[in-house]
Image: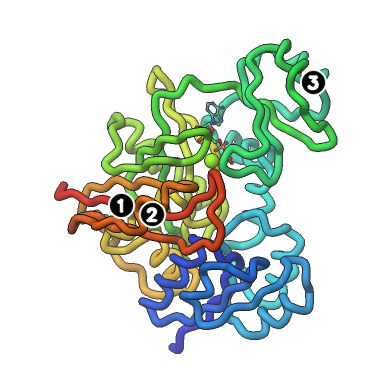
Amino acid sequence: MSKPVLGIIGGGQLGSMLAMAAKKLEVKTIIFCDDINAPAQKYSNEFICGKYDNKEKINQFIKKVDIITFEFENIPYKTLNEINKIKPVLPKPTVNKIIQHRLTEKDFLNKLNIKTTEYILIKNKSAISSSKNLLPGLLKTTTLGYDGKGQYKIESINDLKFLNINFSKEYILEKLVKLKKEISIIITRFANNKYEVYEPIENTHEEQILKHSKIPADISEINFNKSKEWAIKIAKNLDYIGTLCVEFFIDGNDNLYVNEIAPRVHNSGHLTIDAYNVSQFENHIRAVCDLQKVKTKRLYAAKMKNLIGNDIFIYKNKKFKKNEFFYDYFKKEIKDKRKMGHLTTIFIK
Ligand code: ADP
Ligand code: MG
């Protein structure tokens, strides 16, 4: 069977790494992105630049590909659904519909008996005043948040005087968990309900942005197993095809909560490139293109450091040890808090 041409919506670092993995598998890729400088165009066979609501450009893209996937989950559901009527979008758009909205995402998890933080939908200021039981808490926009954007920490009702919250948007208020640890599970689900599940990854954040990831995670055996079980349950109930990430919190009493789901390859899984025989990106391509599933095995222990903003300068001219792997995302503009690259170090386990 000849291999499909894969369309990827989004051309940042995740798109780049997907395109590289596809190249290894001899799958042709076409990137669609609204940024003329999108780094992923370096690695793909073709690049189409257009706004995500430009029907003409989107149609041009659809005509050229067999299957479509994406590197970020916030493409409007309507757009994905329209595309899906013509060529298959994987994972399917209904997954995005659930996950794009923090309330439907959390409701979905709780219906599966998967524990999340306590939460409530907030439409106005007075709704916060009547939810004191959730304070201290985090107020998060229901849609379009990432890397901590659109979040406000509220210690007490008094804080509302100082925060300039725009109530033309909807929010959820989430009780703050006293975090002992954060972990994530990267899982790939293939057709016929087959899975490859990577072991839990331990993550640390700085200013709500992922800074370090490592495997093995220093967690209890119970949470090691439970996080994997929940990730499988989530992927199965979403009828998911491709790679997915589940982010978890662990509190001081070792309780496990799901924080959120990312319906795509994920930053915490970058270490799978060097620490596993098959990376999260390769597994995603294998799953969405319906290629053979390869038993995924960890080869090394590893830690990954995100290079954010100006961090990248130090690394661009650095000499690396044999167990260090530096990735430059070749972004044209360096911005504060922007993910510019990462460094993975592997160790004999
Ligand atoms: P984003 O969609 O921006 O990634 P998250 O909901 O994952 O937003 O929040 C980013 C980070 O903020 C989390 O990884 C965690 O470190 C912290 N955080 C978010 N919600 C909570 C919470 N309810 N309790 C404690 N920490 C939280
Ligand atoms: Mg997150």
Residue 90 coordinates in the image, percent (x, y)? 57, 66
Tell me: residue 184, above or below residue 332.
above
Query: Where is mark 2, residue-wise?
Result: 270
Is 100 located above or below residue 55 in the figure? Answer: above
Does residue 314 lie above or below 281 as drawn? above
Q: Report whether 333 appears left or right of 172.
A: left
Residue 111 at least partly seen: yes
Dot 2 falls on a residue whose secondary structure is loop
Residue at 24% x, 55% y: name it.
Answer: 324
| Comes first in the chain, label 2 or label 1 | 2
Q: Residue 113 has which mark?
A: none
Q: Residues within 10 Å of mark 2 (few under 14, many from 20)?
A: many
**Amino acid type at mark 2:** His
Q: Residues within 10 Å of mark 1 (few under 14, many from 20)?
A: many
Circles 2 and 1, Cβ within 8 Å, touching? The answer is yes
**x and y percent of residue 257 in the render?**
49, 30
Element under disc 1: strand
Using the image, tell me which numbered label, if any, was put on residue 344. 1
Label 3 sits on what residue type? Ala
Q: Which residue is mark 3?
A: 127
